[in-house]
């Protein structure tokens, strides 16, 4: 809401700390500004300042900044006080002289998530695009509000996608807290943010799917294979278990008009979302959603805040599993499970 407080600059440290780009004197609030320049590889730093000392978010608006170099995100943020600086690149004289130790070296992956006031709405997953979209990591829903969580692993080169989700549909910033997330891959910031709706997806990793150097070289056969005289019989896809969730919301006495009602069904000991409410629930309405479940063990969670009263019913294969008039939330474990709720 106070654009005139914001200024920034980019400095080339390999050229005598020369300032090569800057911005200031903004006069339109809540407006997106884009500025760019073509520059060669070097060691740069980006410094952004706020003359009042409260950054760009979140007391007086939801401002943010994002800096890209080539195809990489090199700086991102919003909350920084008076100023903050992000650096990237190197001078030619700083180029390390190293020989690669392997054909496909693994890279570090680090994910940090700061939850908002409703952590049970937040989850994320990473899929390997080069492995037919296979999910390789996931976390959430979270239990602690306004808390920083970090996750790290090592991945072989591939093309990946991270999907951030919020079951209520208001992201993790900035209406109900100042949540955020960042993803670093191979030491580079490749994704980040906090202000989204139901979900946000970002691809990162290799530009193309890598080919294994050990893949066999196969020459085509000179004689084509015979086409079978009959087509194979296809096995129809069946619904292992059918779920039906009915939710009736009542009048909510909420001075701030921010009451939440959301539910999800999890498997893998509560680590993976199998189903969730697909719409925002209004007050004094009845909603019914249904679908298929293919696993054997599930956890059903329904969330509200301290102002919401909700009647719900969960049915599995037309059998009522749980029903209640809740105020804050409930969890129900169903199916054949080997762990405790």
Image (cartoon, rainbow, N blue to C red):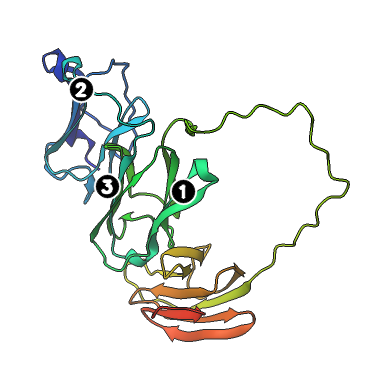
Residue 183 visible to an observer of this rendering? no
Asked whether the beta carbons under mark 1 and mark 2 sit within 8 Å of each other, the answer is no
**What residue is at 40 percent from the left and 78 percent from the top?**
339
Residue 179 vertical position relative to residue 292 in the rendered view, above or below: above
**Which residue in the protein does label 2 denote?**
96
**Which residue in the protein does label 1 denote?**
127
**Which residue in the protein does label 3 denote?**
61
Q: Position of residue 182 (x, y in %)?
A: 30, 46
Q: Position of residue 290 (x, y in %)?
A: 61, 70
Helix, strand or loop at disc 2? loop
Indicate which label's residue lies in the foreground, 1 or 3: 1
Q: CA distance from mark 2 to mark 3?
A: 43 Å
Helix, strand or loop at disc 1? strand
Residue 134 vertical position relative to residue 314 in the rendered view, above or below: above
Query: Which residue occupies the foreground of this view, 254 or 238?
Result: 238
Q: Which quadrant is the C terminus positioned in?
A: bottom left
């Amino acid at each position: 809401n106070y654009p005139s407080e914001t200024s920034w600059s980019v400095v080339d440290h390999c050229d005598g700390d020369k300032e090569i780009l800057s911005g200031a004197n903004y006069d339109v609030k809540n407006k997106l500004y884009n500025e760019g320049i073509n520059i060669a590889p070097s060691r740069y730093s980006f410094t952004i300042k706020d003359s009042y000392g409260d950054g760009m978010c979140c007391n007086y608006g939801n401002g943010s900044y994002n800096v890209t170099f080539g195809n990489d995100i090199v700086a991102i943020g919003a909350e920084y006080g008076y100023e903050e600086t992000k650096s990237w690149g190197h001078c030619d004289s700083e180029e390390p002289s190293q020989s690669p130790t392997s054909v496909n070296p693994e890279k570090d992956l680090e994910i940090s998530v700061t939850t908002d006031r409703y952590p049970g709405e937040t989850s994320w997953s990473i899929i390997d695009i080069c492995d037919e979209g296979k999910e390789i990591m996931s976390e959430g829903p979270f239990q602690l509000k306004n808390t920083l969580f970090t996750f790290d692993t090592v991945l072989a080169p591939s093309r990946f996608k991270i999907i951030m989700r919020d079951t209520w549909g208001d992201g993790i910033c900035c209406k109900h807290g100042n949540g955020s997330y960042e993803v670093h891959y191979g030491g580079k910031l490749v994704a980040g943010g906090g202000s989204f709706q139901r979900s946000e997806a970002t691809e990162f990793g290799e530009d193309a799917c890598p080919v294994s150097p050990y893949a066999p070289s196969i020459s085509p056969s000179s004689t084509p294979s015979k086409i079978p005289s009959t087509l194979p019989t296809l096995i129809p896809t069946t619904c292992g278990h059918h779920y039906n969730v009915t939710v009736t919301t009542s009048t909510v006495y909420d001075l701030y008009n921010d009451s939440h009602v959301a539910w999800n069904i999890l498997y893998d000991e509560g680590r993976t979302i199998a189903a969730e409410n697909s719409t925002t629930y209004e007050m004094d309405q009845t909603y019914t959603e249904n679908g298929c479940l293919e696993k054997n063990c599930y956890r059903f969670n329904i969330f509200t805040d301290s102002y919401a009263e909700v009647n719900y019913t969960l049915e599995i294969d037309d059998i009522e599993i749980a029903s209640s008039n809740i105020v804050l939330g409930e969890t129900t474990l169903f199916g054949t499970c080997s762990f405790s709720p």
